[in-house]
Image (cartoon, rainbow, N blue to C red):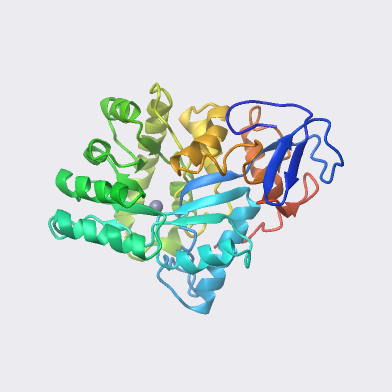
Amino acid sequence: MLDGKGRVIRNTRIVIEGSKIVAVDPRATPVDYDLGGLTVLPGWIDAHAHVTWSFGKDGKNAGAGLTTPEAAYSSAANAWVTLMAGFTTVQSVGSPTDIPLRDAIAKGLLPGPRILTAVEPLAGRGEQTGTPDEIRAFVRKQKQAGADVIKIFASQSIRQGGAMTLSQEQLNAACDEAKQQGLRSVVHAYKDAVRAATLAGCTQIEHGTMATNDDLKLMAEKGTYLDPQAGLVIENYLLNKEKYLGTPGYTEEGFAAMQKVLSLNHELVHRAANTPGLKIVFGTDAVAGAHGRNAEEFIDRVRDGGVDPMAAMISANSLGAEALGMSAQIGTIAPGLEADIIALDGDPLKDITAVRRVVFVMKGGIVHKNVAPRAAPVHRGIVH
Ligand SMILES: [Zn+2]
């Protein structure tokens, strides 16, 4: 058992009452679920997903905007395959369509990961974004709409060059207002925007491509979380190119830039992993086509980013929980925490591809998956 904080415990038993872990005790009886021979760890946390993004009826990327019955079922299916893949919590960053899905799962009406959502992100558009006061009002509006976190776009897409789209003053207003409202702020940032968001006191930086070593050092000093992506998001775009091409934001030029961005991202993850004290969390940026394959990002980080496998696991367990402000609820196998527990057929510390073989998933004390090792994944072949 990996406890989620870096400890390995062998031959133990986890005692659960209701939705909670009450003890970790090798002598506890009876044994209801024998996970002997497997690796047991806390359910993973994906800090950056787009759980409602799906392909539409025409097979093309429909983003999160559709509100048809088909789109609603696709969102529910995305949630289910994400849970089956071992992710018991995801942060969606975000869409208003997240809210009914989040709430249905929270009520126990649908199986899926616990969802946190940013509702409507603040899209940086230079001056047009608004004055600091207008930006503060936008942040308060998201809170009123039920946001768990505030998402801010401070850079263009990296496919368009990644230039800054908010001034320092605008970023300061956005992240400060989030803090005033008791919410965290996660900022889509490349290059110069990484430093600006760090200086603005934002909680977490998404992507971070082309951040300098000094930027990474500053983040470590200020305790700003970094969520870089080592591969899945771009691999998924390349795999589903025809489904994305021609939909808003996806051009041939953008696709041509992706290979280069992929190598920049590998390089960033390497540098980040070698920055002392930098808190790197696990986020996939899973969009249509990537749901249920979120764990591929672990393999990318370890294989292509030089991340230590134990650090990769912690990034999606206790450190991921800390970044969400949920250390007291999730991310660790310890008494008092939610019984979010998964088991892998294999040892990810020796072979990171074991993350593909999730054979047991419990969320809040309820078993959602319990299949024989080496059984075919129930959702194989589903590509949303
Ligand atoms: Zn994203």
On screen, residue 360 versus residue 225, left or right, reads right
Left or right: 124 in relation to 87: left
Give the quadrant of the N terminus.
Answer: top right
In the image, residue 208 sits, relative to residue 375, either above or below, namely above
* Residue 155 seen in this snapshot: no
- Residue 5 lies, with reference to residue 96, above or below; the image says above
Q: Residue at x 20, y 45 (%)?
A: 172
- Position above or below: 217 against 187: above
Residue 281 vs 151, above or below: the answer is above
Q: Which of the image's four quarters has the C terminus?
A: bottom right
Looking at the picture, how far across and down is residue 22, in whole percent? 70, 40
Check the image and name the residue furthest to the bottom.
69
- Work out whether residue 237 or residue 170 is closer to the camera in this orientation and state it: 170
Residue 125 is situated, as x and y percent measured from the top left of the image, at 19, 57
Residue 251 x %, y %: 32, 59
Residue at 54%, 40% in the rendered image: 328
Q: Is residue 243 visible?
A: yes
The residue most toward the right is: 30
Q: How many marks?
A: 0
For residue 227, what is the image quadrant?
A: top left
Q: Position of residue 275 (x, y in %)?
A: 38, 23
332 with respect to 184 (left or right): right
Residue plotted at (69% across, 42% down): 21
